[in-house]
Amino acid sequence: MEYLHKPVLLNESIEALNIRPDGIYVDGTLGRAGHSKEIAQRLTTGRLICIDRDGAAIDAAKERLAPWLDRVTLVRGNFSELAEILKSCGVSAADGLLFDLGVSSPQLDDAARGFSYMHDAPLDMRMDASAHLTARRVVNEWSEAELRRILYDYGEERYAPAIARAIVRARGDRPVETTLELVELIRSAMPAKALREKQHPAKRSFQAVRIAVNGELDALEPMAEAAAEVLAPGGRLAVITFHSLEDRIIKRALLAQARGCTCPPEFPVCVCGNKPKLKILTRKPIVPNEEELAENPRARSAKLRVAEKCGS
């Protein structure tokens, strides 16, 4: 199947990586290989390691990256295991790391995966189909307090208390089984003025449940720490985020790696000995231009942050 997929901030992220033909690069979120394709075709004697936890993404990449498979290694795994994956591939240091934290278009568009609030499907939302936790379990088994927390924290949903109450009340009669059942529950809990907003009323809640199901935020700080360790001096880290919570975590994690010293501010001199590991290259994140937004509305909230390993 040929997927219609537009990689976000493609030119900007490729430029940020400063690719050398003989370098070693990692696409930690393979998706439908849009970024990987651009990296691979720039390599000669170099190597590209592509990581994704979605088996469908790995299978699709075998065809999409077929002309360059001599320089590509496909790994089914989670970028939270970055250091272990590189070690298993015999790589001690990488020249560039790219992480696109968005859900790939095919995952959103495949109704059967349960990511979309526009199509009816079983509540699933797993990026890794072999994972144990599903959206159905979150919606039907998590406490009202936990549902309220994830809706508030992960979806920044201001009507989180009312939506959580509506879900718990409904599942008391029978389980919530499908995406459109959940959409209707969300709608029923929101005031009329919220339903008139341009944004779909279920967007924030679906984002929150998806993040909870896949543990998307848990891996971000460890990923930044691992990246600072596995990058070669002068190597680049490029991270594309899609909502403010992700971006705040990445910004904070990069600043921590760029700061070095962890001594309390009142200490007159540094005694911890920690040195900066990364240099931040983007004082403000790079965002899509008007041309890209016209071609791909899904890029609207994308932000690219770039850092370089110290010691170049």
Image: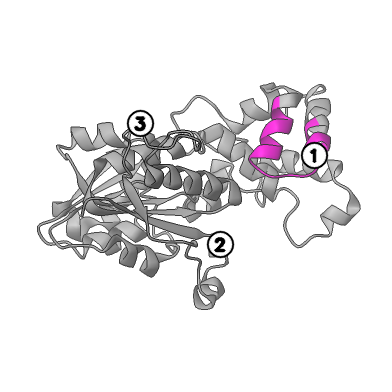
Q: Are marks 2 and 3 in contact (CB under 8 Å)?
A: no
Q: Nearer the viewer, residue 216 or 280?
A: 280
State the residue position of label 3: 272
274 to the left or right of 42: right
Locate residue 286, reporting x and y percent.
47, 65
Q: Nearer the viewer, residue 203 or 82?
A: 82
Locate residue 16, reporting x and y percent.
33, 63
Residue 298: mark: 2
User: Could you tell me which residue is drawn at 22 percent across and 59 percent down?
Assistant: 40
Q: Amino acid at mark 1?
A: Leu
Q: Is residue 188 magenta?
A: no
Q: Amino acid at mark 2?
A: Arg
Q: Earlier in the sequence, mark 1 or mark 3?
A: 1
State the residue position of label 1: 185
291 to the left or right of 10: right
Residue 70: mark: none
Q: In the image, which residues are magenta?
A: 146-164
Toward which corner of the image does residue 46 lie, by quadrant?
bottom left
Q: Is residue 153 magenta?
A: yes
